[in-house]
Amino acid sequence: MTGKEAMNPVRKRRVLLVLVLLLAACAATALVAMALQRNVAYLYTPSEVLKGEAGAHARFRLGGMVRAGSFKRAQGSMEAHFAVDDGDAVLPVVYTGILPDLFREKQAVIATGRMQAGVFVADEVLAKHDETYMPKEVADKMGAAHMKHGVPAVDMPAQAQ
């Protein structure tokens, strides 16, 4: 036999089908990975954000306590201004919309959004659901801040997983 031999037509179709299926699977995997990457929002404390760990334009969750005396809302406006504190740093937050009923100063809060000109602009604000709850990630990070500053530990009830 000389030169190139022609591939069996049935085998050729099978190889082509396998290649097309493999290409489709790779494309679907890439699309799912991109969609998940856009929807992932990592939790940071104000001190981590101010250190630059959150990234300049990334969407992320900000967790901490609403600082006492920081909540302000103009009469007739939906724009709320408050500060989130983690024991090490304070970060100003602005949110336009209806705040959760349980939103209060000195209470745990998680806000999702991004930084703009030194202010965290929140798209969503979540407040704790009862007087003993604090998200585990926030409790862990605030506990580390308390230990760093020598604040006595308070017995925390069971955390939600």
Image (cartoon, rainbow, N blue to C red):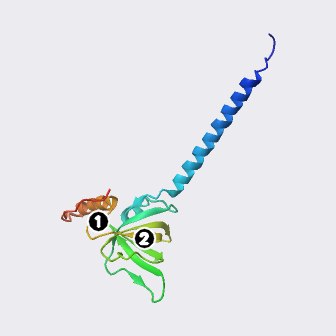
Q: Which residue, given by chain and number where applicable, does mark 1 sit on?
A: 133
Q: Nearer the viewer, residue 148 or 42?
A: 42
**64 left or right, relative to 80:** left
Residue at screen point 48% across, 56% down? 40
**20 left or right, relative to 153:** right
Residue 45 image offset from top left, x and y in percent: 37, 63
Q: Mark 1 packing: few (<14 Cα in 10 Å), some, or many (20+)?
A: some
Residue 22 image offset from top left, x and y in percent: 63, 36
Q: Mark 2 packing: few (<14 Cα in 10 Å), some, or many (20+)?
A: many
Residue 65 image offset from top left, x and y in percent: 33, 70
Amino acid under disc 2: Val
Q: In which quadrant will I find the C terminus?
A: bottom left
Cα–Cα gap, marks 1 and 2? 16 Å
- What is the total number of numbered labels drawn onto the structure image? 2
Amino acid under disc 1: Tyr
Q: In which quadrant will I find the N terminus?
A: top right
C-beta proximity under 8 Å, tags 1 and 2: no
Residue at screen point 48% across, 85% down? 77
Q: Is residue 136 above or below residue 104?
A: above
Q: Is residue 1 above or below residue 140?
A: above
Q: Which residue, given by chain and number where applicable, does mark 2 sit on?
A: 125
Task: Tell me the number on the disc at residue 65.
Answer: none
Residue at screen point 29% across, 63% down? 142
Residue at the limit of the structure toward the bottom, as seen here:
75
Residue at the limit of the structure toward the front, as seen here:
10
Residue at screen point 73% across, 29% down? 13
Q: Secondary structure at mark 1?
A: loop
